[in-house]
Image (tube, rainbow, N blue to C red):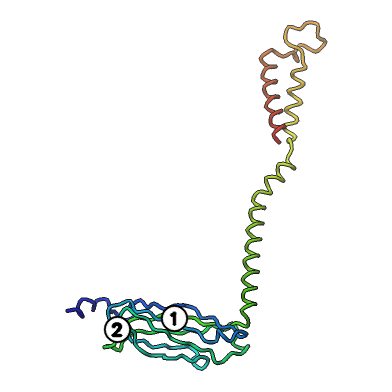
Amino acid sequence: MHQQKRQPELVEGNLPVFVFPTELIFYADDQSTHKQVLTLYNPYEFALKFKVLCTTPNKYVVVDAAGAVKPQCCVDIVVRHRDVRSCHYGVIDKFRLQVSEQSQRKALGRKEVVATLLPSAKEQQKEEEDKRIKEHLTEGLFFEQSFQPGKNSAVSSGPSLLTIFLGVVCIAALMLPTLGDMESLVPLYLHLSVNQKLVAAYILGLITMAILRT
């Protein structure tokens, strides 16, 4: 009865596999990193058997490459890098952990772990630090540039020729005589009414405000 309840979950290849870490990084100048540990967890209520496969098995030694994990337990798998040479720097290898139920041969789930050999931990830290600094400077420049055009435009922009022309016309209109001023020597057709001068004064005020804002 217990087997029938969990049988629907045991579909080939669909069982989640819990492994930590999911990436192994070996440093050539740090011998302590040449041996690392993968931990395989079994959170299920039934036992699992596992097998460790590798894309380049000649470069690694896997202690206990096959075994079993009790229900709700974990097991440590030791991985040693045995071919630390410069020609392998930066090459990405992969380990695959396959798990299955003890009474069956089919793989119920699998998980891949990548492994990389790097020349130096210090160089890696320096590259990461340089990358962070570069990203920080890029962000700083981005924010500066986003605000800078407004400042430049405010300094470089000034009143347009059309604005200046309208201002001069309005000033000239205000200087012309008003209708009914018979003593003026200006021709009668250039005399403006009070309403026309009020409009000219209003437009001149708008132009003055626009010039002051720029």
| Disc 2 versus disc 1: nearer the observer | 2
| Callout 1: SS | strand
Residue at 62 percent of width and 63 percent of height: 135
Disc marking residue 47: 2
Find residue 103 and report its image quarter: bottom left
| Placement of the N terminus among the 4 image quadrants | bottom left
Label 1 packing within 10 angstroms: few (<14), some (14-19), many (20+):
some
Q: Earlier in the sequence, mark 2 or mark 1?
A: 2
| Callout 2: SS | loop
Position of 5 with respect to 16 (left or right) is left
Separation of marks 2 and 1 at Cα, in angstroms: 21 Å
Residue 51 is situated, as x and y percent measured from the top left of the image, at 38, 88
Residue receiving disc 1: 112
The three-letter amino acid code for the residue at tag 2 is Ala
Label 2 packing within 10 angstroms: few (<14), some (14-19), many (20+):
some
The three-letter amino acid code for the residue at tag 1 is Glu
Disc marking residue 17: none
Q: Is residue 173 above or below residue 165?
A: above
Residue at 39 percent of width and 84 percent of height: 75
Residue 155 is situated, as x and y percent measured from the top left of the image, at 74, 42
Q: Is residue 73 above or below residue 134?
A: below
Residue 201 is situated, as x and y percent measured from the top left of the image, at 70, 20
